Amino acid sequence: MKLRVAATVMGAVAAVLLAGSPASAQAKPYDHQDPARSGCWNAAKVVRSAKINSRANGQVGTIRLWWSGRCKTNWIEVRTATSASGTINVYAADGRYDRFSFKKGNKGRHWGNMIWANNMCAWGSASVQWNGGRGGQNGSGTTSKACG
C-alpha cells in the first residue's frame, strides 16, 4: 500500500512539473536524430562557422553550423585533429539543445544530432582535447547565432 501511495504522489508531482514546463521546450520533429541517417544532410548548407582555438596551440579546428531547409533543423559539424575527442552542442532559441560526445578517429570529422529550429535562432559550440587535455592540449569554439 505504501508503494502505491508513493507512486501516486510521484505521478502527481511529475504531472504538475510537466504542466508547468513551456510548450516551446517540448521535443520537435527530428530533435536528437542523426542528420546523415535521417537524410536531412542531403539538402543542407553551412550557415555559420568559427575557429576552434587553443590558448597554447592556436587554431585546432573548425566548427560549422548546418541548416536543413527540408527538415527545418540545425546541427554542428567539427573538423579537428584525428587524435582529438570532445563534445558538440547545438542550441535553439526556445531552450532545446543537444549534446553529443565524440571519440578520436573518423579523420577528425564529427557531427552531432539535430535540433528543429524553424523560424528561430540557433547556434553551436564545441570543445576538443587530445593527450588528456593537459598542457593546453584543448580548445573550444562557438558559432554566432543564425536566425531564420
Image (cartoon, rainbow, N blue to C red):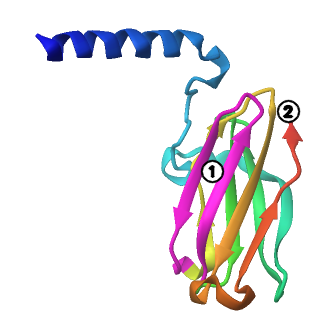
What secondary structure is found at the residue carrying circle 2? loop
What secondary structure characterizes most of the magenta part? strand
Q: Residue at x 75, y 75 (%)?
A: 139
Q: Residue at x 49, y 9 (%)?
A: 16
Q: Can you tell which quarter of the image residue 142 is in?
A: bottom right
The magenta region covers 84-106
Q: Which residue is mark 1?
A: 41
What secondary structure is found at the residue carrying circle 1? helix
Q: Can you tell which quarter of the image residue 92 is in?
A: top right
Nearer to us: label 1 or label 2? 2
> Taking 26 as reference, is 39 above or below it?
below
Residue 94 image point, x, y percent? 73, 28
Real-space Cα distance between discs 1 and 2? 18 Å
Q: Residue at x 43, y 10 (%)?
A: 15
* Residue at far left of view: 1
Q: Which residue is mark 2?
A: 148
- Between disc 1 and disc 2, whose residue precedes? 1
Q: Residue at x 59, y 55 (%)?
A: 112
